[in-house]
Image (cartoon, rainbow, N blue to C red):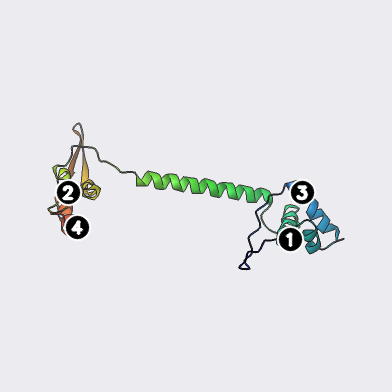
Amino acid sequence: MTDTSDHGEEKPRPRRSFTPECKAEIVELCRRGDRSVGQVAKDFDLTETAVRDWVKQAEVDAGERDGLTSDEREELARLRRENRRLREDVDQELSRPRRLPGPAHPDRRTAPAGRSPDSRDVDLHLAVEQVDFRAGDGIAARPDQRLVDTLAAFTGHR
């Protein structure tokens, strides 16, 4: 029941969904043994693979065959969705720009000769600032000059 175009290509069948009751009824017809799986699939305009999968899943759910039950499959799908969402949340949080506390570094306002200021220049200085904790003095940010010089030489920022 697939359409063919002028080029002989088959169009994929639209995806259909079936209720658990409908699947159980078809599985029961297959289990009776009156008709083969292929014949049941043909009678209901289903793919033989789909019907075989439903029969296998019913056997797993009944404990007759090894594998994940329908409930376990649903839980696994839910956990995978949740895991994907949490990974996206973490990735989004990690991609947010971070600012260190303390006064602005004077070099953040100017760019190296021949270059325009951009976020990489700002990030270079943010990456090399260290936070100095002193009791009662609060927080003061100061650059580690050796690291600034090394990164500047490496990146061409002078």
**What kind of residue is marked 3?**
Cys
Q: Nearer the viewer, mark 3 or mark 1?
A: 3
Residue 35 screen position, x and y as percent: 85, 61
Dot placed on the residue nearer the N-terminal end, 3 or 1 = 3
Q: CA distance from mark 4 to mark 2?
A: 16 Å
Amino acid type indicated by mark 2:
Asp
Disc ID at residue 137 = none
Q: Residue furthest front?
A: 6
Local crowd size for mark 1, using a 10 Å CA cut-off: few (<14), some (14–19), many (≥20) = some
Considering only vertical position in the picture, is 120 above or below 41? above
Label 1 residue SS: helix
Question: Do labels 3 and 4 touch, CB within 8 Å?
Answer: no
Give the residue displayed 45% in from the left and 47% down from the top.
88
State the image coordinates of residue 50 (x, y, percent, origin top left): 71, 58
Give the mark, 2 or 1, whose residue is nearer the N terminus: 1
Front position among marks 2 and 1: 1
Q: Earlier in the sequence, mark 4 or mark 1?
A: 1
Q: How crowded is the residue under tag 4: few (<14 C-alpha within 10 Å), some, or many (20+)?
A: few
Q: Nearer the viewer, residue 93 or 37?
A: 37
**At 63% across and 48% down in the image, what residue appears?**
74
Q: Which residue is mark 4?
A: 155
Query: What residue sits right under mark 2 in the picture?
Result: 144
**Near-viewer residue (72 or 53):** 53
Q: Are discs 4 and 1 less than 8 Å apart at CB? A: no
Of the two numbered discs 4 and 2 on the same chain, state the one appearing first in sequence: 2
* Residue 125 appears left or right of 77: left
Q: How many marks?
A: 4
Q: Amino acid at mark 1?
A: Arg
Task: Name the element at disc 2.
Answer: loop
Q: Residue 118: image x %, image y %?
A: 22, 48
Report the residue marked by disc 1: 52
